[in-house]
Amino acid sequence: MLNPAMTKSAITPRRDEDFPEWYQQVIRAGELAEPSDVRGCMVIRPWGYGIWENMQRQLDAMFRATGHRNAYFPLFIPLSYFAKEAEHVEGFAKECAVVTHTRLEVDAEGKMKPASPLTEPLVIRPTSETIIGASYARWVQSYRDLPILINQWANVVRWEMRPRLFLRTTEFLWQEGHTVHETEAEARAEARLILDIYERFARDHLAIPVLSGEKSESERFPGAVQTLTIEAMVQDRKAIQAGTSHFLGQNFAHASGIQFQNREGKQEFGWTTSWGVTTRLIGTALMMHGDDDGAVLPPRIAPTQIVILPITPKEQTRAAVLEACDKIAARLRETHYAGLPIEVFVDRRDLGGGVKNWEWIKKGVPLRVEIGPRDLEKNSVELSRRDQEVKAKESMPMEEFVARSPEILASIQDSLYARAKKFSDANTRVINSKKEFYDFFTPGNSAKPEIHGGFAFAHWNGSREIEEQIKNDLKVTIRVIPLDDSAEGGQCIFTGERNARRVIWAKSY
């Protein structure tokens, strides 16, 4: 997907020159988000938040279709709640923001300072298993109360030392599902169900191919028995954890006292799960589909799917052109794509056509439509697809365009997925030796590393020590242990020991 050709582009630097900086400039040029005055936090601008709103609406519909409902739980969690689950609190301890005082007062020097210590510190929500567990312990009395299938859309705070817009910020937005079940089998099935929803959402809505499977023990969610994940490869060939679903066993039920009377009349602890995706998905989509001219948005998540650009070089034709633009926009809004009315915007701003055109290119709007006096004479429009070269245009009769607009948007969606899948497949390699593995993940220029690596499919003996060694040597971790039945016996490439299957290794964000 990367094009190293020395051509002029809207984004500087290009992807092949400095991918991390390219990513920041794409966000800036597209007006998606910006750093705030609070270190590690971001301001999500309307275009970026519009993407999140679409993701939220579409995912929420998928959750509701499987019986889940939304609720809301407190932002503040008593410190003692975390202490009940030792492994959980240890996993999040370094990321917690803690409130210790209420009220501010002015000191003798005229400066504001905290005044009243709390009797118990409050942790600002890093995740909600413990506070939600306290409610579930009250709600669950009998097996007849189960299952509980609840999701919440919320913000989360995890103190981030190396922030990166959308991918890692101190405060971010997410959804977190929390469920309680009567049996272990039901809880495990729930975790798999959600993993399947995440995989389908990534593929069909974000146009992102992902690998799904299980995390290794060292990569599990703190306190979980099993963590399931979807992992995406972006254009610098690194992995992004795009969503996780956790089978928690009875660990959190014991910690929170979630008990019920079973069908035999005996007291039993519930079986729980938790699962979530975050605004990281926006960054993943940008890194997967963007090019050297800015963002490229799949139509299903774009806040505006079609932008109409009136071309009005002369005042005497301006009114007629604008009227035609408004009429075609109204007809497009009556047309449906992916089950929803098409989102259309007529850009009537008093700016040069070239300026407006490039703004929408950088924002990644899927389809740009120009209508000017000559188009009115021919009863046609000029189309530009964001998945094609930015200067490419196609003339089409207005009636045909309105009728075919859902088909064109679907074609853009499909082409973005096909392009991403081709890239991911091309950079996933089966590796059978330690030397080949180290060569694969070692840049040719260590001072200024070029884009290298990808997904390595290699045998591993299950040793945590080997995991740590590879992480220290190459900054490479196990991203996915496949769940399918395609086990392939072989030898661990690091120790020579026999083992049953390969796992996916990669550098990651």
Image (spheres, grey):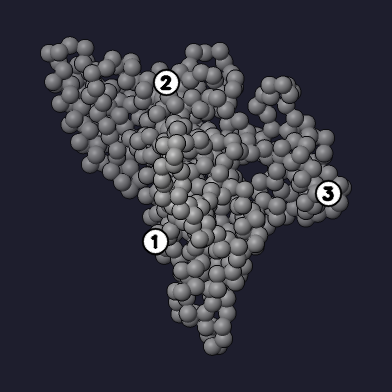
**Residue kind at label 2, given as amino acid type:** Val
Q: Circle 2: is it few (<14), some (14-19), or many (20+) Cα within 10 Å?
A: few
| Residue under pointer 2 | 390
Residue 485 in view in this figure? yes
| Residue at left offset 21%, top offset 31% | 328
| Residue under pointer 1 | 71
Q: Position of residue 353 (x, y in %)?
A: 29, 16
| Residue under pointer 3 | 491
Q: Are marks 2 and 3 in contact (CB under 8 Å)?
A: no
Q: Quadrant of residue 342?
A: top left
The local secondary structure at tag 1 comes to loop
Residue 232's place in the image compared with 26, above or below, is: below
Please state which of residues 229 and 411 is positioned toward the viewer in this rendering. 229
Q: Position of residue 312 (x, y in %)?
A: 21, 16
Q: Residue furthest bottom?
A: 265
Who comes first in sequence, dot 2 or dot 3?
2
Q: Real-space Cα distance between discs 1 and 2?
A: 44 Å
Q: Residue 281, which numbered label?
A: none
Q: Quadrant of residue 43?
A: top left
**Residue kind at label 3, given as amino acid type:** Gln
